[in-house]
């Protein structure tokens, strides 16, 4: 079973929910940190890293001995990653989407592929939890291919908890696509509500059942609760704003360890998710 | 033309609330919301839309079933798993490379340009604002960010505004790279948590990669003083100007609920004073003033 923890707005508590949920379950669970631009789950779970893989995406390289400057490669490329000049071909690897079109279209077989580093894929364990994260190389623009690689590393035998990036565009979709359940985390403020609406629209596009965690539930106003009710989205957990919880988070500690009653609450959250899934 | 871009790496550190507060303090400026993915600045600015435009992204494949012979060439060539075995295009997986379109032996695949969102030029209480909304589950957010920033620059030239205040997106990927290129200075808003520190390090590295000067402001600093000190130490280590500490204050949430900037909600207060001091430090910083000359008169004398 795959549960993706997402939010729309950043900083609402995705990582807190994802890591504490994983730790509360304890066994037969893995955490995939798919916020590859700013991965944070390792700061809380402190996994023992076992293996790091460099992740590359294929980009073209042109053999100038064979090239006849016919321009077919530049014409097929929708991303302007190749420019054919009078006596040379310029490749802009950072624009390449790795579709392979240029290589297929080249009549001289002058194009082969080399790699552009997207980032790294890191494997480890933490208290019996299987841990994987992706770290986008600083300066690299495209995160979805790396997110797909993190997702591909999932073990179908385990309960998979995905920590998604913020937003509603392609990186988030890559982290939610194919999940069994989306756990949306929000805060009851105008920003939280606005971005929650967008996130719910994204979830509806994918047609995946979802539920809500309201974090810092006692700040702001009541509109998030009214919205959840009108949209029939079950509120599965509310976390009050407590300075103590904020401080635990700020130090990289786990709420379920520091305040033991939360372990039970996160276990209940998981049972409620399976309950919602059983109904659908 | 000078442009201040507010970024953070980590989401939810207070970029938008601070951008709105700065907008209330800035003179003769234009606002730009470059977080097109989950834009929030308009909730505080209530912009009156004056001009609405479509944002057209790239094309996406569309198979005409009556022409398709089911030969399977597209299925074999697509590297994104976007062609289903019933020869339909999964638009969520399709990246718009057009390889299937060009190699279909019976030209059964169209490539219609997609409308991926909208962008707006608006009027606000604090001057003009350019903002956008990317369609749900769309790609090309970087492209839309570039478009919005370009439109802001044009408008700034027309209106003879000297200053652009840009609210940036979280992260370090495509939309952020599009949001910071060519900026005069980056204001990095950090919260004093282990995540805040970690994410700031990556954003600082990104700023260095693109050679854009950055300045750091610690928001909600009193949530963890030790962490605030660690952030400030790291900033100094990277030769980054420290703008100051802003306290954790529920006035931000109250102002947000009221749809106002913090200064409109309550003019005076310790937090308000800190933000005024921060803003003063930003606009008088060497990066914002050519050749490092803050006060021309004194320099000439």
Image (cartoon, rainbow, N blue to C red):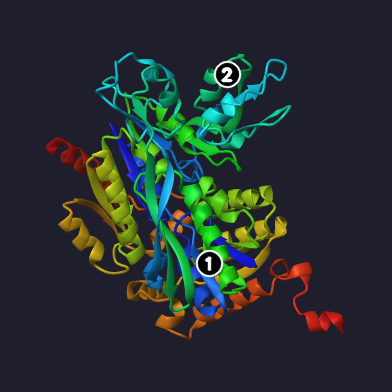
| In the foreground, B31 or B58 | B58
Decide if residue B119 is on the left or right side of residue A64: left
Residue, x 53% and y 53% (percent of image)? B146
Residue B141 visible (yes or no): yes
Vertical arrangement, residue B39 with respect to residue B127, above or below: above
Query: Which of the chains bears the disc numbered 2?
Result: A
Residue, x 23% and y 39% (percent of image)? A207
Q: Quadrant of residue A268?
A: top left
On-image quarter of the N terminus of chain B:
bottom right
Query: Which of the chains bears the disc numbered 1?
Result: B
Residue B278 location (% of width, % of height)? 60, 74
Decide if residue A16 is on the left or right side of residue B200: left
Q: Residues within 10 Å of mark 1 (few under 14, many from 20)?
A: many
Decide if residue A36 is on the left or right side of residue B108: right
Question: Can you name the residue that lies furthest to the left here?
Answer: A279
Which SS class for mark 2? loop
| Residue wearing tag 2 | A106
Decide if residue A66 is on the left or right side of residue A126: right
Residue B84 location (% of width, % of height)? 30, 23
Q: Which mark is residue B149?
A: none
Q: Quadrant of residue A117?
A: top right
| In the foreground, A247 or B234 | B234
Residue B270 location (% of width, % of height)? 51, 81
How many numbered marks have been drawn onto this rendered protein structure?
2
Residue B42 location (% of width, % of height)? 39, 67
Q: Residues within 10 Å of mark 2 (few under 14, many from 20)?
A: many
Residue A187 visible (yes or no): no
| Residue wearing tag 1 | B221
Tell me the mark number nearer the camera, choosing from 2 and 1: 2
On-image quarter of the C terminus of chain B:
bottom right
Which SS class for mark 1? helix
């Amino acid at each position: 079973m795959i549960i993706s923890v997402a939010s729309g707005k950043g900083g609402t508590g995705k990582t807190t929910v994802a890591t504490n949920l994983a730790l509360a379950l304890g066994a037969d669970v893995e955490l995939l940190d798919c916020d590859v631009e700013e991965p944070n789950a390792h700061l809380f779970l402190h996994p023992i890293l076992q293996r790091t893989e460099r992740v590359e995406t294929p980009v073209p390289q042109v053999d100038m001995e064979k090239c006849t400057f016919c321009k077919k490669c530049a014409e097929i490329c929708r991303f302007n990653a190749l420019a054919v000049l009078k006596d040379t071909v310029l490749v802009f690897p950072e624009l390449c989407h790795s579709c392979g079109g240029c290589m297929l279209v080249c009549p001289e077989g002058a194009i082969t592929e080399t790699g552009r580093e997207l980032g790294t894929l890191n494997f480890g364990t933490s208290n019996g939890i299987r841990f994987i994260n992706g770290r986008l190389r600083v300066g690299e623009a495209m995160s979805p291919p790396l997110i797909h690689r993190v997702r591909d590393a999932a073990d179908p035998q385990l309960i998979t908890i995905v920590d998604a990036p913020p937003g509603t565009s392609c990186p988030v979709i890559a982290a939610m696509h194919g999940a069994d359940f989306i756990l949306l985390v929000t805060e009851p403020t105008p920003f939280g509500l606005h971005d929650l609406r967008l996130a719910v629209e994204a979830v509806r596009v994918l047609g995946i059942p979802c539920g809500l965690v309201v974090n810092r539930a006692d700040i702001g106003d009541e509109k998030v609760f009214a919205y959840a009710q009108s949209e029939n989205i079950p509120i599965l957990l509310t976390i009050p704003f407590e300075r103590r919880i904020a401080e635990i988070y700020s130090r990289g500690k786990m709420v379920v360890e520091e305040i033991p009653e939360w372990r039970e609450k996160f276990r209940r959250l998981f049972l409620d998710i399976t309950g919602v899934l059983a109904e659908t | 033309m000078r442009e201040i871009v507010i970024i953070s790496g980590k989401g939810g550190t207070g970029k938008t609330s601070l951008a709105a507060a700065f907008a209330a303090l800035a003179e003769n400026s234009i606002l730009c919301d470059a977080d097109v993915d989950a834009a929030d600045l308009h909730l505080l600015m209530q912009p009156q839309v004056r001009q609405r435009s479509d944002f057209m992204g790239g094309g996406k494949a569309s198979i005409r079933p009556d022409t398709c012979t089911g030969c399977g060439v597209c299925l074999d060539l697509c590297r994104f798993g976007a062609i289903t075995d019933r020869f339909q295009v999964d638009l969520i997986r399709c990246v718009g490379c057009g390889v299937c379109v060009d190699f279909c032996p019976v030209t059964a695949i169209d490539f219609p340009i997609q409308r991926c969102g909208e962008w707006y030029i608006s009027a606000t209480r604090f001057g003009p604002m350019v903002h956008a909304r990317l369609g749900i589950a769309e790609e090309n957010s970087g492209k839309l960010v570039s478009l919005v920033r370009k439109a802001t620059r044009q408008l700034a030239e027309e209106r003879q505004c000297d200053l652009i205040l840009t609210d940036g997106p979280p992260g370090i990927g495509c939309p952020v790279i599009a949001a910071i290129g060519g900026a005069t200075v980056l204001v990095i808003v950090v919260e004093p948590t282990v995540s805040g520190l970690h994410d700031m390090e990556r954003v600082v590295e990104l700023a260095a990669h693109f050679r854009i000067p950055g300045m750091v402001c610690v928001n909600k600093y009193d949530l963890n003083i030790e962490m605030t000190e660690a952030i400030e130490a790291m900033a100094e280590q990277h030769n980054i100007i420290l703008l100051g500490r802003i306290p954790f204050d529920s006035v931000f949430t109250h102002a947000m609920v009221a749809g106002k900037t913090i200064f409109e909600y309550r003019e005076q207060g310790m937090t308000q004073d800190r933000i005024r001091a921060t803003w003063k430090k930003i606009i008088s910083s060497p990066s914002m003033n050519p050749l490092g000359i803050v006060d021309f008169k004194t320099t000439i004398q």
